[in-house]
Image (tube, helix red, strand yellow):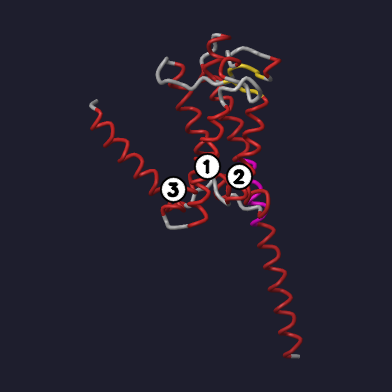
Amino acid sequence: MTPIVECLVAFLFGSVAGLLMQRSRFCNTAALRDAIMFKTYRNTKAMLVAMMILTVGFTGFMSVGAGHPLQFDVGLNTFAGLFLFGIGMVLAGACTVSTWVKAGEGNIGALWALIFTFVGMFLFSLVWSASWWPPAPQTMTGQINAPALQLGFANAQTLQDKFGIPAIVFGLAQTAFLGLLYRGILRRERAQHAEHEKHQKEHQKKKAAAAAAVEA
């Protein structure tokens, strides 16, 4: 495939993905925020379905030796970064994907969030090669490195290489867990719907009783 064709394919895929994101209003932040604060699960269910599809797809490719999975160490810096990123998503009111979408729609707040996302990445790159924590690249060897607070590589490819078990097995296990979460959400929604209908019926009965009292 020539570079021009690759660019065209990337442009087409990006355009379709962007259109779907914009029309569906999908957002990772909303998937977690709405479930916790408002007990609504529209985005949460979409996120779980996407995770299940991607998990099976990626681990399937890994099992047959296709693709180029990322190799990165998991350590305390990973959890610290995720925590800070989560704070940033809450303050921005959107995840990175929906921030791009909102910026494209002309949202000034999203545009500032996007700009300073790149500013933060640039500032971090300046200290990436420093010898103090966060760990420098030379401390990330793929093995447990306690002084650097690194736990080594941690993905399905790593587990496949170490134990000889196909990555798809770990992918199916994760997918099953995500499926249980999805099923739990459906049960919660059914319970909410039943409770809502119960309240509606009680309200209608009270309304009918009040009307009967007035007529009497």
Q: Secondary structure at mark 3?
A: helix
Q: Residue at x 56, y 32 (%)?
A: 124
Crowd tier of the residue under label 3, counting other residues whose Cα lies within 10 Å: few below 14, some 14–19, many 20 or above = some
| Residue denoted by label 3 | 21
Say whether residue 69 is left or right of residue 120.
left
Q: Nearer the viewer, mark 2 or mark 1?
A: 1
Q: Name the kind of residue labelled 2 in the image.
A: Gly
Q: Residue at x 59, y 20 (%)?
A: 136
Q: Position of residue 106 (x, y in %)?
A: 43, 58
Q: In the picture, residue 16 is in which quadrant?
A: top left
Quadrant in which the C terminus appears = bottom right
Tell me where residue 37 appears, x and y as whole percent: 68, 52
Q: Which residue is mark 2?
A: 88
Helix, strand or loop at mark 2 = helix
Along the viewing direction, whichever of 18 and 126 lies nearer the viewer: 126
Residue that label 1 marks? 117
For the magenta stretch, what is the residue range? 183-193
Q: CA distance from mark 2 to mark 1?
A: 9 Å
Check contact, mark 2 vs mark 1: CB within 8 A.
Answer: yes
- Marking on residue 159: none
Q: Residue at x 53, y 41 (%)?
A: 47
Q: Amino acid at mark 3?
A: Met
Q: Main secondary structure of the magenta part?
A: helix
Q: Nearer the viewer, residue 37 or 104?
A: 104
